[in-house]
Amino acid sequence: MKQLYYDIEKCLGCKSCEFACAVAHSKSQDLFGMIFEESLSLPRKKVLSSKGKNYPVSCRHCKEPKCVEACMAAALVYDSQNGMVLHDERRCVGCWNCVMVCPYGAIRPDLKTKIPIRCDRCKDKSEPACVKACPTGAIIWQEELILYTK
């Protein structure tokens, strides 16, 4: 299964990934069209800065996700087939428990819809939009790394 990885040494903090994410999740899937949409698309990832470093943050699709455990409406489920946490927005009641329990701060509330948003790895595309948009290659889309320790 492919995962998103980040090389913080290469991240400029330009937020190209945020723009590309917002456009990819908009109705028009076009930057200029998106601006005129009734409901503005929000990015599912964000870039935070601390001590001179930039850190792209998005859902890690944890194997034991706290957000799934906290979801009282069962709107979040972990799909072990594709290694992703899936969100059924029709079931979501907007309690934002998932936002509160995410240890990575990767789920954000959409104040207009009252539905939390999080990275879905652009599930309908061959590659996440953020990967294509990153000018330095700081966002990496590759098979899951397996680290061995003794």
Image (spheres, helix red, strand yellow):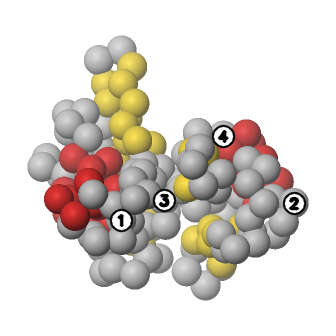
Among the 4 quarters of the image, the one containing residue 101: top right
Amino acid at the residue labelled 2: Met
Given the image, on which type of amino acid does mark 1 rest? Answer: Ser
Q: Nearer the viewer, mark 4 or mark 2?
A: 2
Of tags 1 and 3, which is closer to the observer?
1
Question: Which of the two residues, 91 or 45, is positioned nearer the viewer here?
Answer: 91
Q: Residue at x 17, y 59 (%)?
A: 32
Q: Which residue is mark 3?
A: 119
What is the C-alpha distance between the residues marked 4 and 1? 27 Å
Residue labelled with disc 1:
26
Question: Residues under labels 1 and 3: Cα distance?
Answer: 14 Å
Q: Secondary structure at mark 1?
A: loop
Look at the numbered discs 4 and 1 and tell me whether their residues touch, using CB distance below 8 Å: no
- Element assignment for label 4: loop
Q: Is residue 94 left or right of residue 28?
A: right
Dot 1: few (<14), some (14–19), or many (≥20) neighbours within 10 Å? many
Callout 3 amino acid: Cys
Q: Which residue is mark 2?
A: 72
The answer to whether residue 141 is visible is: no
Q: CA distance from mark 3 to mark 2?
A: 20 Å
Q: CA distance from mark 4 to mark 2?
A: 18 Å
From the viewer's perspective, is the residue at label 4 or at label 1 nearer?
Answer: 1
Pointer 4 with pointer 3, Cβ within 8 A: no
Residue 117: % across, % down: 56, 55
Q: Position of residue 15 (x, y in %)?
A: 26, 40
What amino acid does circle 4 point to?
Pro
* N-term mark: 4 or 3: 4
